[in-house]
Amino acid sequence: MKSNFINIASNGLVEKARAFRFLSIAIILFVLIFSSCKDDRSNIKNPFPHGKDTIVVVKDTWNYNTIQGLHAGLFKPTCANSGCHDGNFEPDFRTVESSYYSLVQQPVIKKDVAGSFLTRVIPNNASGSMLPYRLKTDLNGNSGIMPLSLEPTSKYPIEKDRSIARVNAWINDGDKDWLGRTPSTVDFPPQLLGVQILQNGSPLPRAGKYEVAETSAGSNVELWFSLSDDNTAIGNLTNATINWSTDPAKFDPSKEQSLKKGSNKTLSGLFSSSCDYLWYFPYDGSKNIKDDVVWFRITVSDAKNKDYTIPNINSMFFLKTYCAVKFN
């Protein structure tokens, strides 16, 4: 009996010793883990000691009273929409350069009723220029106020007054170009307003506005050209010639022929429903067979621009097809 009691007491001491040892180990582990989690950020070197946790807003630095600023803020996003002033008709707002050259001292195509505005942009004369007038007035009551259409994201409705003020400021400051130059003796080359290919006095059909004119194989046709120039009367243009080729990129200089000056005709044009045609050429198509496409180009000179070719190497392809004839 006494031996059993001693064994039980001995076993109890062993269990207590085990429990104490387990507790000691647990405390040591806790201390070690806690120590490893101590914030020691003061010993970490910041790789970006001068950095700031802020958002830097880059401000728009365009001067909107320049042609570059007007193109970036108004002409390109608002006017050069698909089917509008994107090269389909003048003014051409696709680039800064095309905007400038198709605006400054260029004659208007569609006049107001009173005929008060004959030039798109007149240096130092915003009140006499068509551009700002067109942004405020419905021309003849049936043309709408420009721009006629806007992208859904356009800010023009809330920026309209400020945009017009910027246009006026640019014009009244001498409508300088992108290099800050004021146009003093501007003489732009002749411009093509329209081409009509006539057969027996009637215009040939086209599959689309800018597509080739179509006629039957072996037919003779007359090509009539409507032109404009800022400083030279159309009848006074010189060195007026025409050339043709079955390759729109290659023309034989030896085939150059003189354009003829005829009685003025009023026909539809490239940009409007009515324009004047003075220069023409009778083309002998007797040797052209089915599926031939003949590409035409003309060359004219004004007082400053010598031997200016239309269409030329820089012209959009639609202008080249507009001046071509297909024989069916």
Image (cartoon, rainbow, N blue to C red):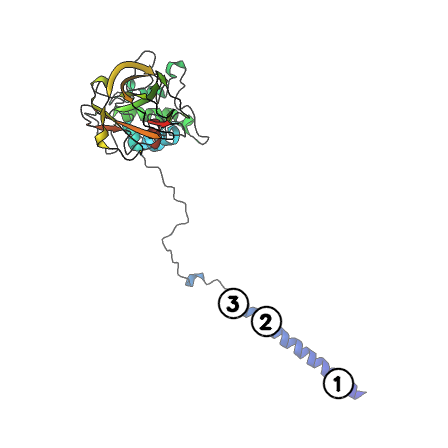
C-alpha gap between disc 3 and disc 1: 42 Å
- Could you say whether the residue bearing mark 2 is in a helix, strand or loop? helix
Q: Quadrant of residue 70?
A: top left
Rounded to the nearest angstrom, the CA distance separating label 1 from label 2 is: 31 Å
Query: Looking at the image, can residue 111 be seen?
Result: no
The residue lying toward the viewer, choosing from 2 and 210, is 210
Query: Which residue is labeled 1 in the image?
Result: 7
Q: Secondary structure at mark 1?
A: helix
Give how far across and how far down residue 182 sits, in percent.
Answer: 21, 28
Q: Is residue 30 left or right of residue 83?
A: right
- Which mark is on residue 27? 2
Compared with 134, 43 (above or below) is: below
Q: Are marks 3 and 2 in contact (CB under 8 Å)?
A: no
Q: Is residue 255 visible?
A: yes
Query: Along the horizontal axis of the image, is 278 left or right of 217?
Result: left
Q: Amino acid at mark 1?
A: Asn
Q: Earlier in the sequence, mark 1 or mark 2?
A: 1
Residue 62 spot, x, y in % from top left: 32, 35
Which of marks 2 and 3 precedes in the sequence? 2
Q: Which residue is mark 3?
A: 35
Cα–Cα span, label 3 and label 2:
12 Å
As drawn, which residue projects farthest toward the top?
A: 114
